[in-house]
Image (cartoon, rainbow, N blue to C red):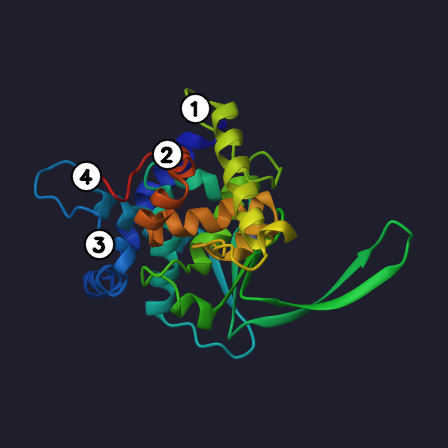
Amino acid sequence: MGFFSPFRAARRKRALERFPIDDELWDWAIKEHKIFRWLGAGSGSEPTDRSRLRELSTLFLVEKRFDPVGGVELDDELKVSIAAQACLPLLGLDLDWYSGWSTIIVTPREYDVTKRDVDDAGVVHEYEDEFSGEAFDLGPVALSRVDIEASGWGDGYNVVIHEMAHKLDGGRDGVYDGCPPLHGGMDNGAWREAFSAAYESLRASLDPPASRRGRGRRAKRGPRIDSYAAESPDEFFAVATEYFYERPALLRSEYPEVYRQLALFFRRDPIGD
Ligand SMILES: [Zn+2]
């Protein structure tokens, strides 16, 4: 919170009044995506998670700029669908967690990027990598339309939440290490312990030691979450966040401590029992 926050608050209040999301469009977005089913509609005067999500999404649409490339058609359904999914992790946080960047590039589908790495011997390696989305440090977020449309079905895959998780991870402290700045009262050590144990166990399940592969031994159970999480601790956090909203029961049964830490960080429990 800085000097300008009272002005920002007033501006946001005006924006909510001036640029409301159309009722029909909003109802469509909520019904269309399975991941919103646990949000209470409520009946009393207390603002519910559903109405809070609508407010956050409205402001998200006002404050972020959409930049379609490659001839992609960007209709209102797609924009609201991106906004609502992007704001789901903010229910217990606030929109300032996404400050410092403003553009969402929407590509038609996955895209190839030529990556260049220099190894320890100074040799340059060039390779093609395929991206369904990307969160640039201090910069825009890129999302592919095909992948946005594949998100929100409750099957574990969500490119929007994945890229937003990277922003939560490093957007504030500038460090993309799978650990966002934690709230007061949360225990940094407990977070690190939960995530590193889960990360190591996932990696071990992907690469079983030779001694375990022999005949007569029961095959080790493969991972139940996307093995992309084994790439690095920051990818583990992004993938775990996808599962937290897409398949919370699976994440909780697989990595209960990770689930617990995420529920503390997001201040929500999608299973809610
Ligand atoms: Zn990622």
Q: Is residue 266 above or below residue 88?
A: above
Q: Which residue is the site of mark 3?
A: 37
Q: Is residue 270 left or right of residue 184?
A: left
**What's the residue type where badge 1 is placed?**
Met
Circle 2 SS class:
helix
Indicate the position of residue 225 as horizontal and vertical percent values.
Answer: 44, 54
Check mark 2 vs ligand 1: CB closer than 8 Å? yes or no: no
N-terminal of the pair, mark 4 or mark 1, is 4
**Where does label 4 land, which residue?**
47
- Residue 20, quarter of the rendered image: bottom left
Whether residue 236 appears in this view of the structure is yes
Label 4 residue SS: loop
> Which residue is at the far left?
43
Q: Residue furthest front?
A: 216
The CA span between labels 3 and 4 is 17 Å
- Regarding mark 3 in the picture, which secondary structure is present there? loop
Q: Distance between the Cα atoms at labels 3 and 2?
A: 20 Å
User: Front-most of 128 and 19?
Assistant: 128
Residue 68 to residue 171: above or below: below
Q: Amino acid at mark 4?
A: Pro
Q: Which residue is mark 2?
A: 260
The residue to which callout 1 is attached is 186
Confirm or deny contact between disc 4 and disc 1 (CB under 8 A). Answer: no
Label 2, residues with CA under 10 Å away: few <14, some 14-19, many ≥20: some
Question: What is the C-alpha distance between the residues marked 4 and 1?
Answer: 26 Å
Q: CA distance from mark 4 to mark 2?
A: 25 Å
Residue at the spot 55% in from the left edge and 36% down from the top edge: 196
Q: Are marks 4 and 2 in contact (CB under 8 Å)?
A: no
Q: Provide residue 239's location: percent of width, then percent of height.
A: 48, 51
Residue 100 spot, x, y in % from top left: 55, 43
